[in-house]
């Protein structure tokens, strides 16, 4: 197996670095989205490398991705800090994505192919086991696949690109809200309601249900963050 040394005394294969980077990014993004790392918190590469038992290369990549998502501000030669993201800003982002996703599902209702419909139904059925097990991480992966299948089913490449871009900006918050009590159960039920409207060919109803689904996610995030604050208090 080929490995690369980054100069800080640790060897990691490229694929291993990618997995480690994902793990670090997810851990930091959830801590930020959940309010456990407030704005202004310093993010030192070496400290994070020691914390996660990694080299600085995957840490640097994780911070770069978090900066792209707007969660971290990178400062030349001074490391990074957690960016300031207000509750109002997050609410605006969820409101925007709710409208975009509603538009996607409305178009998808009329344009979806039999193969795409089968893919959505298979995903929805498979998610039942994740909900029963309370496996938030697995459900998060499914949730991403479910929504991205809907984007593709619009058969509007530009709209799908915009939906995916804003999803990436909200990924940490969308993942974190799933940890709010019973949220994955409610999320799956909301997906089922959207699929039922699509099956009836009612694009407007499907859009309304998707909009409500996304706004419910925003509310769940708020409850989760508030609960975290109470526990720490």
Image: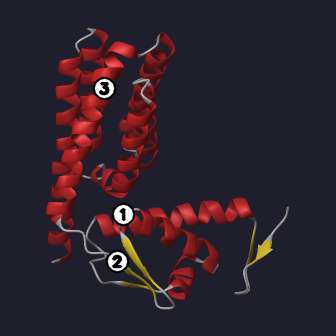
| Residue placed under numbered mark 1 in the picture | 30
Which residue appears at 51% of the width and 81% of the height? 48
* Marked residue nearer the N-terminal end (1 or 2): 1
Across and down, in percent, residue 167 comes to 37, 47
Q: CA distance from mark 1 to mark 2?
A: 12 Å
Q: Is residue 137 above or below residue 106?
A: below
Q: Are marks 3 and 2 in contact (CB under 8 Å)?
A: no
Q: Is residue 95 above or below residue 54?
A: above
| Residue placed under numbered mark 2 in the picture | 82
Across and down, in percent, residue 216 comes to 17, 42
| Residue placed under numbered mark 3 in the picture | 105
Quadrant for residue 83, please give it: bottom left
Q: Is residue 181 visible?
A: no
Q: Is residue 50 left or right of residue 174?
A: right
* Marked residue nearer the N-terminal end (1 or 3): 1
Quadrant for residue 69, please give it: bottom left
Q: Nearer the viewer, mark 1 or mark 2?
A: 2
* Marked residue nearer the N-terminal end (3 or 2): 2
Quadrant in which the N terminus is drawn: bottom right
Q: CA distance from mark 1 to mark 3?
A: 27 Å
Quadrant in which the C terminus is drawn: bottom left
Which residue appears at 78% of the width and 73% of the height? 4
Q: Is residue 181 left or right of residue 175?
A: left
Return the residue nearer the eye: 224 or 41: 41
Across and down, in percent, residue 90 comes to 21, 58
| Helix, strand or loop for disc 1 | helix
Quadrant for residue 84, please give it: bottom left
User: What is the crowding at mark 2: few (fewer than 14 residues within 10 Å), some, or many (at least 20)?
Assistant: many
User: What is the crowding at mark 3: few (fewer than 14 residues within 10 Å), some, or many (at least 20)?
Assistant: many
Q: CA distance from mark 3 to mark 2?
A: 34 Å
């Amino acid at each position: 197996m080929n490995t690369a040394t980054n100069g800080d005394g640790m060897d990691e294969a490229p694929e291993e670095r990618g997995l480690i980077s994902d793990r670090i990014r997810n851990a930091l993004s959830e801590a930020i989205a959940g309010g456990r790392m407030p704005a202004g918190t310093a993010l030192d590469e070496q400290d994070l490398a020691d914390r996660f038992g990694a080299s600085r290369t995957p840490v640097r990549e994780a911070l770069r991705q978090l900066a792209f998502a707007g969660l971290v501000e990178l400062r030349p030669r001074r490391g990074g800090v957690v960016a300031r993201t207000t509750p109002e800003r997050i609410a605006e982002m969820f409101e925007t994505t709710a409208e975009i996703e509603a538009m996607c599902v409305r178009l998808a209702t009329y344009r979806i192919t039999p193969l795409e419909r089968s893919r959505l139904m298979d995903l929805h059925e498979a998610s039942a086991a994740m909900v029963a097990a309370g496996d938030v991480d697995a459900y998060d992966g499914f949730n991403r696949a479910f929504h991205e299948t809907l984007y593709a089913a619009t058969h509007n490449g530009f709209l799908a690109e915009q939906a995916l871009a804003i999803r990436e900006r909200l990924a940490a918050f969308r993942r974190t809200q799933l940890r709010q009590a019973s949220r994955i159960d409610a999320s799956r039920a909301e997906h089922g309601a959207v699929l039922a409207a699509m099956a009836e060919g009612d694009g407007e109803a499907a859009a309304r249900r998707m909009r409500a689904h996304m706004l419910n996610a925003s509310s769940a995030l708020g409850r989760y963050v508030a609960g975290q604050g109470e526990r720490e208090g």
